[in-house]
Amino acid sequence: MRIPGGTGPAVWAAPAVPPACTAGNLGVWVNVSSLSGAAGTYYYALEFTNTSSHACRTFGYPGVSATGINLNQLGDAAGRSPVYKAAWVTIPAGGTAHVLFGYGAAEVDTSGCKPAYASLLRVYPPNENGSDVTFFSLPVCTLKHHTYLFVSVVRPGTNI
């Protein structure tokens, strides 16, 4: 962006960088209509909608875990799936970004992992300590060291 500068040489200013996206300005939801799968693993788009009045940006992997209705975590948090290279994603006000969210049903069904039913997903935006929750009922592993959930890095746009 060029800023007029009186009689001296032209002055250039970098465009303003949007603030980081936080749990307070993002709504999270699982796009169940995006379901795909193979070999006992189901994939959904986990969507992040910017509910604030300004753009925000994010980079990397979110934290995701399954919980009961009481918000107690059931089993391990989601593992990281490096299917995409991380890049800064700017989400405009009212806009949406997504991650690929994988659920290993075969791991839950066949590994003897003491399954239980989760009611919610707790989601931490990348590099943030605050979280949000979304309704999503699924059977889960309650034993440690049974990774059955996976997430990619945040990607621009919806995956609808």
Image: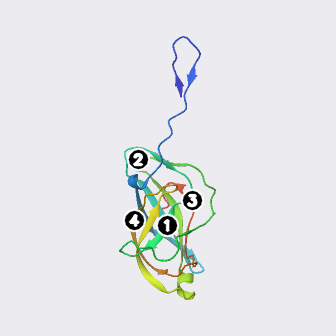
Residue 25 shown left or right of residue 97 in the figure: left
Whole-percent x and y of residue 1? Answer: 53, 29
**Labels 3, 2: front one:** 3
- Disc 1 or disc 3, which is closer to the eye? 1
Give the x, y percent position of residue 58.
Answer: 51, 51
- Quadrant for residue 7, please give it: top right
Mark 4 vs mark 3, CA separation in Å:
18 Å
Residue position for label 3: 153
Q: Tell me residue 12's x, y (percent).
A: 57, 25
Residue 140 x %, y %: 48, 80
The residue indicated by pointer 4 is 133
Q: Which one is in front in this view, the residue at disc 2 or the one at disc 1?
A: 1
Q: What kind of residue is marked 3? A: Val
**Which residue: 37% across, 48% down?**
52
Circle 3/circle 2 CB separation < 8 Å: no
Q: Are marks 2 and 1 in contact (CB under 8 Å)?
A: no
Earlier sequence position, callout 1 versus callout 4: 1
Residue at 52% x, 70% y is 77
In the image, taking residue 82 as reference, residue 52 lies left or right, namely: left
Q: Which mark is residue 64?
A: 1
